[in-house]
Image (cartoon, helix red, strand yellow):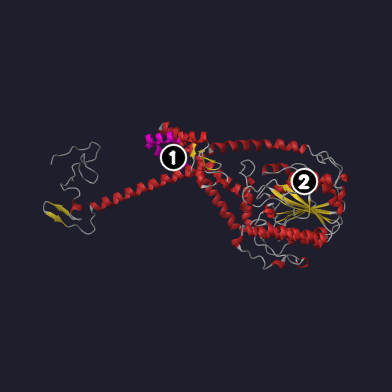
């Protein structure tokens, strides 16, 4: 055989010889023919005839099969990874930020940002292309994290996540998990959220870089496809093509989202100036103390927030029959005992959660619809309803059954006394949101404040038995048996499968309303004035779409002179406002209330 030329790089393998010793003419360097083993069923041959191999000898045909299988596996794996990368990038580009828009049709769109990115990557040199792909991937990953946050906020609070104002809600969410499901649930959820927040941008970045390599390797096909999709995007944009109503095929989700974020951030940064203007125009700030609330002198006035008691409870076909029946029966019962009542609706500053925003809005007369505004508001000297009662001579208290830590914001509400979980002295099992039953909260308030009071009492009391997860629902017991709450032992067994359901919500609201009606029947007198209202609508899982933010509000009093003062409001008689009842912004209530029961200001008649 003619000798083959040798390498000059130090490798003695003849040129034209493969790594397994096979030459370009199909023979091996020892003179045998490649593939002989396959032809003889696994036996080697030579000029002397077949040669038997030991059972553990490697067979060349097996190597080829294994190598071919490995190549197929790598191709399948590579194709799968590329498909997953493309899917993740598409989700980041076109996924909606509102849970109501999260439908299959939302992902059958053409993202213009993706087309622009592909065109840019195709024309860049290799090194700048890698840098740009990394930057674009990281930014798109952060966009996806924000979209996930938006979806969560839209599901619970019916709005998008606010980059400036909503970071405190993350802590509130963790606290809710801890108080409702235990410390382990809180730690697990926080760990999962942190891991996801870190992993998502990384995975999107790796996906963009992988797709960049693929499109560059198929430059001509990619350029043609990008041109075709760009033409389709322009045509769909001009024609307004939609796969489903409200979901355009020509998507600009990322660009529109970033623009909205910029406006949101700018509005948040400028809100302090707007708030300062509103605070400066308080018509009651300089009213003399002895002129405030003169028509309520000697009355015990309770402002009671019923957690998640929204308009949906009175009007939803699945919820309203029992809730309406309780309110209508309560109207008859209280009327028979000599009480009158008037009801309407307020539009809350929040929905689905953030009860403290609604509390501050009602009591201050300033709309607190995000955490930043709330924080700035409670740092001001705005006159709250609590503060007005205190200036006018009432003893003021905050009854906070879920309060377990320091709460410096309490000073804004001018309390003489704050009753947290410890001060209320509850010794029974915890119910929904790890709180005592509403009946116990009112019983403890009666014992601690109204019983020994030598001055009229004004109290702000949130009732939490109707707080998500709405189970277990406490039983109504005899007021004389409540004591320290031990009577509830053995009654706090929850059907965990019912948590968060509409049925559980309905039962919880019914319990809270029955408790309030029963309290008036038991402890009401000529000097009791009860204002009870919802703080916000429940989560969207209960309300459905387009439910709004309205909550019922009712004033109950035995003294007819109290209700005569609000006759001009146009509120409806009874505890149950119908759909035609007046609707006020929640922030308007403070001024109207102070006007009705004291001197008239220039803001409302």
Q: Is residue 12 left or right of residue 373?
A: left
Residue 107 image position (x, y, % from top left): 50, 44
Q: Earlier in the sequence, mark 2 or mark 1?
A: 1
- Does dot 1 land on a helix, a strand or a loop? helix
- Does dot 2 land on a helix, a strand or a loop? helix
Residue 42 image position (x, y, % from top left): 20, 55
Q: 433 or 117: nearer the eye?
A: 117
10 Å neighbourhood of mark 2: few (<14), some, or many (≥20)?
Answer: some
Rendered residue at 51%/45% (across/down)? 105
Question: Which of label 2 and label 1 is nearer to you?
Answer: 2
Q: Which label is found at residue 369?
A: none
Residue 3 is at least partly visible in this image: yes
Residue 278 image position (x, y, % from top left): 75, 38
Q: 71 or 550: nearer the eye?
A: 550
Residue 135 is at least partly visible in this image: no
Magenta stretch, main secondary structure class: helix
Residue 221 higher or lower than 454, as above or below: above
Q: Which residue is mark 2?
A: 589
Q: Alpha-carbon distance for marks 2 and 1? A: 56 Å
Q: 476 or 194: nearer the eye?
A: 476
Q: Is residue 72 left or right of residue 476?
A: left
Quarter of the rendering occupied by the C terminus: top right
Q: Is residue 106 left or right of residue 384?
A: left
Residue 175 image position (x, y, % from top left): 64, 53
Q: Which residue is mark 1?
A: 209
Chain part drawn in magenta: 204-230
Q: Are marks 2 and 1 in contact (CB under 8 Å)?
A: no
Report the number of discs.
2
């Amino acid at each position: 055989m003619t000798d083959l030329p040798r390498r000059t790089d130090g490798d003695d393998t003849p040129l034209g010889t493969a790594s397994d010793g096979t030459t370009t003419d199909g023979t091996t360097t020892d003179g045998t023919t490649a593939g002989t083993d396959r032809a003889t069923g696994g036996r080697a041959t030579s000029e002397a005839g077949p040669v038997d191999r030991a059972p553990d000898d490697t067979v060349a045909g097996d190597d080829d099969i294994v190598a071919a299988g490995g190549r197929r596996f790598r191709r399948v794996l590579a194709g799968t990874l590329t498909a997953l990368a493309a899917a993740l990038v598409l989700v980041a580009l076109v996924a909606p930020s509102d849970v109501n828009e999260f439908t299959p049709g939302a992902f059958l769109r053409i993202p213009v940002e993706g087309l622009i990115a592909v065109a840019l990557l195709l024309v860049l040199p290799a090194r700048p292309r890698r840098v740009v792909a990394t930057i674009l991937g990281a930014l798109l990953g952060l966009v996806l994290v924000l979209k996930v946050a938006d979806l969560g906020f839209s599901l619970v609070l019916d709005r998008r996540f606010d980059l400036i104002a909503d970071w405190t809600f993350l802590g509130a969410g963790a606290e809710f998990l801890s108080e409702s499901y235990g410390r382990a649930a809180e730690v697990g959820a926080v760990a999962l959220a942190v891991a996801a927040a870190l992993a998502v941008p990384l995975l999107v970045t790796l996906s963009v870089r992988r797709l960049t390599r693929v499109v560059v390797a198929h430059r001509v096909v990619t350029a043609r496809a990008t041109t075709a999709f760009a033409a389709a995007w322009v045509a769909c944009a001009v024609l307004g093509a939609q796969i489903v109503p409200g979901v355009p095929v020509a998507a600009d989700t990322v660009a529109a989202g970033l623009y909205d974020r910029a406006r949101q951030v700018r509005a948040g940064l400028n809100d302090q100036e707007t708030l300062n203007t509103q605070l400066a125009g308080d018509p009651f700030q300089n009213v003399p103390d002895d002129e405030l609330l003169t028509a309520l002198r000697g009355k015990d006035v309770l402002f009671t927030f019923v957690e998640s008691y929204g308009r949906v409870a009175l009007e939803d076909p699945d919820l309203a029959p029992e809730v309406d029946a309780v309110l209508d029966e309560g109207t008859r019962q209280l009327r028979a005992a000599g009480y009158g009542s008037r009801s309407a609706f307020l539009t809350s500053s929040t929905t689905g959660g953030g009860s403290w925003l609604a509390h501050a809005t009602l009591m201050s007369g300033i709309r607190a619809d995000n955490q930043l505004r709330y924080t700035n508001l409670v740092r001001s000297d705005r006159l709250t309803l609590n503060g007005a009662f205190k200036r006018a001579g009432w003893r003021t208290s905050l009854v906070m059954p879920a309060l377990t830590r320091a709460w410096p914001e309490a000073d804004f509400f001018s309390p003489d006394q704050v009753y947290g979980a410890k001060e209320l002295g509850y010794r029974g099992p915890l119910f929904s949101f790890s709180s005592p039953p509403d009946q116990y909260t009112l019983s403890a308030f009666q014992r601690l404040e109204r019983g020994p009071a030598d001055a009229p009492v004004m109290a702000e009391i949130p009732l939490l038995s109707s707080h998500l997860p709405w189970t277990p629902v406490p039983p109504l017991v005899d007021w004389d048996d409540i004591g320290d709450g031990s009577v509830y032992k053995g009654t706090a067994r929850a059907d965990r499968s019912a948590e968060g359901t509409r049925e559980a919500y309905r039962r919880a609201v019914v319990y809270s309303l029955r408790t309030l009606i029963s309290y008036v029947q038991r402890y009401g007198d000529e000097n009791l004035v009860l204002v009870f209202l919802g703080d916000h609508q429940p989560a969207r899982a209960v309300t459905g779409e387009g439910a709004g933010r309205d909550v019922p509000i009712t004033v109950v009093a035995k003294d007819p002179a109290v209700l005569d003062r609000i006759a001009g409001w146009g509120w409806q008689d009874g505890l149950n406002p119908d759909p035609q009842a007046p609707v006020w912004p929640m922030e308007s209530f403070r001024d109207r209330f102070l006007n009705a029961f004291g001197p008239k200001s220039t803001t409302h008649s």
